[in-house]
Image (tube, rainbow, N blue to C red):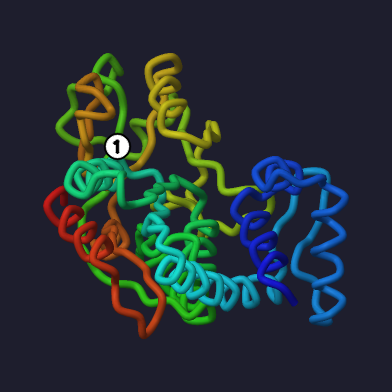
Amino acid sequence: MTLQQIHYVITIADQGSMNKAATLLYTAQPSLTSAVRELERELGITIFHRSGRGVTLTADGEEFLSSARRLYGSFEELSEKYSGKKLKKKFGVSTQHYSFAVKAFVELVKRFGTLEYELAIRESKTKEVISDVAGMRSEIGILYLSSFNRAAIMKLLRSSGLVFNHLTDCGVYVYLWAGHPLAGREKITFDDLTDYPCLQFEQGEGSSFYYAEEIRSTAEYPRTIKANDRATMLNLMKGLDGYTLCSGIICEEFNGGDYRAIPFDCGGDENENTMEIGYIARKNTVLSTLGEAYIQELKTQL
């Protein structure tokens, strides 16, 4: 096993594609593939599942990647110390689709700048948020828990060596554009929404209901449309009078002032209508200076 092979695996995992990794590493894809296969044979495990859509980590691969990132990070620190070349410190956040998480990241960048730091924020699917933090691609992940998904998500976090940290509790709101026929309501019921499409963030083929970013994901919505980014979601709200269910914590600076968050009167137990927003991090680790600063920015936004 060589440091080069470890670097190859980290880059492939981050890019999710052999082609993209080969381009970034300035190497031919056959050489990259050969190096990874040689490493897999040496270790006696399969690191990547390969398909026409790209590559994904196996369970063994995720475990190996976690250790590989620590090892390669130590190598980079050692190299910086003795080569005289100062490397940028890295900090990453993975989050479900929350504008407040992006706003907090923007404030962090304004505070620390980009000359000394390599910063990244990834709005992603729920499972990928968890995978990014478990694999040390991101230091912090932002997601929510509810009475419906709590047991399943907490079980996945424990098995991934992660812990959930509470930030805030909030109610459920219907998020729609200001020109929507229901935009003037003081509250909105499920029956009120029958004639309009429910917009949901796509979680990937075969994903569990527990990964849904919208609370009450098992309800039978007559009309649904999937999207994979916030910009598309906002466009669908305007173009199709669509709506989504959210925390009501909205950053107008990024989403604009043409949208409304109206309390959702969904009935039932109050606990079923509460979202707990928090951050996940690796168990038994101390947050970096940027990690601590980002959490403080989150609290400010919330």
- In the image, 13 versus 161, the foreground residue is 13
User: Extreme left residue here?
Assistant: 300
Task: Give left or right: position of 2 versus 298.
Answer: right
Determine the residue positioned at 68% across, 73% down.
59
Figure quadrant of the N terminus:
bottom right
x, y percent for residue 188: 26, 35
Quadrant assignment, res 99: top left
Task: Give the residue type at disc 1.
Answer: Val
Q: In this view, does 112 lie above or below 91?
A: above
Q: Is residue 168 visible?
A: no
Q: Nearer the viewer, residue 167 or 18?
A: 18
Q: Which residue is drawn at 35% across and 63% down?
A: 146
Count of numbered badges drawn on the protein: 1
Of residues 252 and 6, the one nearer the viewer is 6
* Up/down of 301 relative to 174, above or below: below
Left or right position of 228 against 276:
right
> Would residue 158 appear left or right of 40 to someone viewing this image?
left
Residue 177 horizontal/vertical position (percent) = 29, 22
Rate crowding at label 1 as few (under 14), some (14 to 19) or many (20 or more) other CA atoms within 10 Å: many
Does 39 appear above or below 161?
Answer: above
Residue 37 x, y percent position in the rendering:
85, 66
User: In the picture provided, is 221 more to the left or to the right than 234?
Assistant: right
Percent coordinates x, y for residue 105 in the rendering: 27, 46
Q: Mark 1 points at which residue?
A: 174
Name the residue rendered at 42%, 58% in the picture: 85
- Given the current orientation, which residue lies at the most extreme bottom position? 284
> Residue visible at 30% across and 18% down?
180
